[in-house]
Image: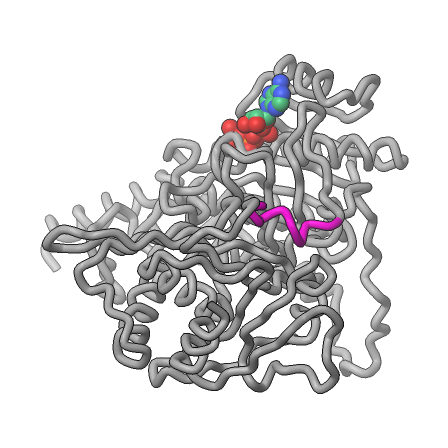
């Protein structure tokens, strides 16, 4: 090795030692002292992100001291020897929120809640904190987006007079952690994680590195002190949570706000829950006094037409544990040379597939037509049991003939034109009968053994059969 080469290596090493920032690959975990477009270890592109390096020696991991102390404290135990005490949950005082949380907040639990701007995240969390504070819990609301005065103004509007919720207007992670340590709240809301930054990193708040680092520290604080932390997260234009995907893995529960900001109804859906069922939804109505739970939401996603209209079909969808009736609307209109297929609240790829099945197996051709499909009320439906209702709504619009009054349908449709059963069909039918629906087209396997009062059920095995039933009903 020449003298010059030695000098270069020494300079690089001493710079690395001085510089607190390194770049870590999100794919392989390899590090680099400077940012590179391609990871030098696994050759993946664009995967290096900034992370903080501890200056306490090259081989020392900055978490190692904590992990070592954990390792010393714990010992290996047989699963059957561990006392499985049921997780203690504290209800938030808002039944619909408790439903999605799996019964209430859990000690040391970390909840991530995302949603469109202005949908009501801060409103709901402030209301929940106030109820918990009134129930005798110590609470903390950390606001990085609004000033304390703005939060106070909102609390007055929500009618939370004399609220004892502690408010901290702060965005620096280290100060937030110190406050958590000093005040020892039972629950803390961080509104929002995108505004928080750590001194250890040079990148701007909201960057992938900052969000990841801050969420990791807060999660560790929750686990070690037992405080329940709720992180508010921004969403991207596509509706996914902004920031790294790893954020969703880090936390215990991920909740999403859904709904049309123009309507007053808001849905909170559990996407992930280590303490409860997923896909459970809580339904709220936005009022001047904040978000109010809707105890019986089955009929809120119906348009209430006085007379049946073409292109509308009601579906019973199962959201979490509750069946809900949702109106599917379709409009089929003459299209140009490249007809459009648009869907709101339903999967667009699935719509294209259903149109192909309609053509091949039921002889209903929409090739030269624009097709628009909408789930009423801003609700998002992901279950395939919506297929049959979507197809019947499209056919009804194409023919300009409404489906009969009190009609509903559900069932998954396969590429071979078969109608597959939907889970918990009986419950769906009972809910529909309760709301006064009288005719149902359902998959054969979902046909109830005993008749349901007031409901005429047509069980079908294939799409063409369903079309024939509808035609015979007039
Ligand atoms: N005076 C009012 N009367 C009725 N509703 C109001 C009133 N003021 C605000 N709102 C409702 O509260 C919503 C704002 O809620 P909130 O600030 O909790 O949303 P957010 O999800 O926290 O938004 P951001 O992402 O901007 O923080 C508004 O969209 C509006 O619907
Ligand atoms: Mg907000």
- At a point 77% along the width and 42% down the height, the residue shown is 94
**Quadrant in the picture for the N terminus:** bottom left
In this view, 228 is above or below 262: below
Q: Is residue 47 visible?
A: no
- At a point 25% along the width and 46% down the height, the residue shown is 35
Location of residue 395 by image quarter: bottom left
In this view, 328 is above or below 350: above
Q: In this view, does 119 lie to the left or right of 309?
A: right
Q: Is residue 313 left or right of residue 317?
A: left
Find residue 451 and report its horizontal and vertical position in percent: 72, 80
Between 206 and 276, the one nearer to me in the picture: 276
Residue 198 covered by magenta stretch: no
- At a point 78% along the width and 36% down the height, the residue shown is 185
**Residue extent of the magenta highlight:** 296-304
In this view, 85 is above or below 257: below
Residue 299 covered by magenta stretch: yes
Between 200 and 285, the one nearer to me in the picture: 285
Find residue 436 and report its horizontal and vertical position in percent: 69, 59
Q: Is residue 245 visible?
A: yes
- At a point 23% along the width and 43% down the height, the residue shown is 11
Find residue 360 and report its horizontal and vertical position in percent: 26, 79
């Amino acid at each position: 090795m020449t003298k010059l080469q030695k000098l270069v290596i020494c300079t690089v090493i001493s710079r690395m030692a001085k510089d607190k920032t390194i770049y870590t690959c999100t794919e392989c975990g390899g590090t680099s002292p400077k940012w590179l477009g391609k990871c030098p270890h696994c050759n993946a592109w664009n995967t290096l992100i900034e992370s903080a390096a501890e200056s306490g020696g090259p081989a020392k991991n900055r978490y190692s001291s904590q992990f070592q102390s954990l390792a010393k404290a714990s010992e290996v135990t047989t699963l059957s020897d561990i006392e499985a005490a049921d997780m203690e949950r504290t209800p938030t005082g808002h039944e619909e929120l408790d439903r999605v949380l799996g019964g209430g907040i859990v000690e040391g639990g970390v909840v991530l809640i995302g949603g469109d701007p202005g949908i009501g995240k801060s409103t709901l969390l402030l209301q929940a904190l106030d109820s918990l504070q009134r129930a005798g819990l110590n609470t903390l609301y950390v606001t990085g987006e609004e000033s304390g005065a703005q939060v106070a103004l909102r609390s007055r509007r929500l009618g939370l007079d004399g609220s004892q919720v502690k408010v901290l207007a702060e965005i620096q992670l280290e100060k937030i952690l110190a406050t958590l340590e000093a005040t020892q709240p039972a629950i803390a809301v961080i509104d929002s994680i995108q505004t928080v930054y750590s001194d250890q990193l040079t990148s701007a708040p909201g960057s992938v590195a900052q969000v990841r680092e801050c969420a990791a520290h807060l999660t560790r604080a929750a686990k070690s002190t037992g405080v329940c932390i709720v992180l508010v997260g921004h969403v991207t234009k596509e509706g996914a949570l902004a920031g790294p995907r790893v954020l969703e893995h880090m936390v215990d529960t991920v909740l999403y706000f859904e709904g049309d900001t123009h309507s007053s109804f808001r849905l909170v859906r559990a996407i992930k829950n280590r303490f409860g069922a997923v896909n459970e939804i809580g339904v709220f109505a936005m009022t001047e006094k904040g978000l109010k739970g809707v105890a019986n939401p089955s009929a809120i996603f119906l348009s209430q037409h006085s007379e049946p209209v073409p292109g509308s079909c009601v579906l019973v969808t199962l959201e979490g544990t509750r069946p809900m009736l949702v109106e599917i609307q379709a409009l089929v209109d003459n299209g140009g040379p490249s007809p459009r297929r648009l869907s709101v609240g339903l999967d667009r790829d699935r719509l294209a597939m259903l149109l192909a099945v309609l053509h091949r197996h039921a002889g209903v051709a929409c090739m030269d037509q624009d097709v628009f499909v909408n789930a009423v009320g801003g609700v998002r439906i992901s279950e395939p049991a919506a297929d049959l209702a979507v197809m019947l709504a499209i056919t009804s619009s194409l023919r300009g003939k409404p489906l009969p009054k009190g009609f509903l349908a559900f069932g998954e449709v396969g590429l071979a034109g078969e109608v597959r059963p939907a889970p918990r069909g009986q419950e769906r039918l009972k809910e529909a009968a309760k709301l006064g629906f009288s005719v149902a087209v359902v998959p054969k396997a979902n046909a109830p053994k005993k008749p349901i009062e007031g409901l005429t059920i047509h069980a079908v095995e294939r799409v063409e059969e369903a079309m024939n039933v509808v035609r015979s009903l007039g």
